[in-house]
């Protein structure tokens, strides 16, 4: 699985971190990022739901 966060689109709503906290976090400025070492989603079944929860569609999930 490949997870991409478009930093130019992200508004820092945090829905991804709330939905899949084992994969997503927010940086010091409040913008979303994938946790280190979990760039492939770590098998978390909530990754796709977190991408759908993003209000601006800043997260893209694709199969690697």
Image (cartoon, grey):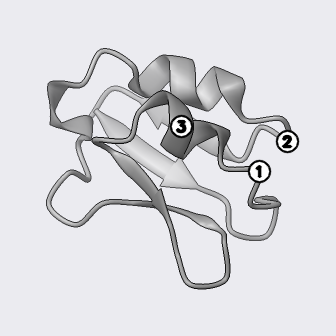
Pointers 2 and 1 in contact (C-beta within 8 Å): yes
- Image position of 48 (left or right of 10): left
Q: Which residue is mark 1?
A: 13
- Residue at 28% x, 41% y is 22
Specify which label sits upstream in the sequence, 3 or 1.
1
Query: Badge 2, how many Cα within 10 Å: few under 14, some, many 20+?
Result: some
Element at badge 2? Answer: loop
The residue sitting at the front extreme is 18
Q: Position of residue 37 (x, y in %)?
A: 14, 60
Q: Nearer the viewer, residue 30 or 1?
A: 30
Specify which label sits upstream in the sequence, 2 or 3.
3
- Image position of 51 (left or right of 63): right
- Image position of 64 (left or right of 33): left
Q: Position of residue 61 (x, y in %)?
A: 48, 32
Q: Which residue is mark 2?
A: 56
Q: Position of residue 48 (x, y in %)?
A: 48, 20
> In which image quadrant can residue 54 be found?
top right
Q: Quadrant of the C terminus?
A: top left
């Amino acid at each position: 699985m490949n997870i991409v966060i478009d930093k130019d689109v992200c508004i820092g709503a945090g829905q991804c971190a709330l939905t899949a906290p084992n994969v997503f976090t927010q940086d010091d400025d409040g913008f979303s990022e994938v946790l280190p070492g979990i760039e492939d989603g770590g098998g978390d079944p909530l990754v796709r739901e977190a991408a759908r929860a993003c209000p601006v569609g800043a997260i893209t999930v694709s199969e690697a």
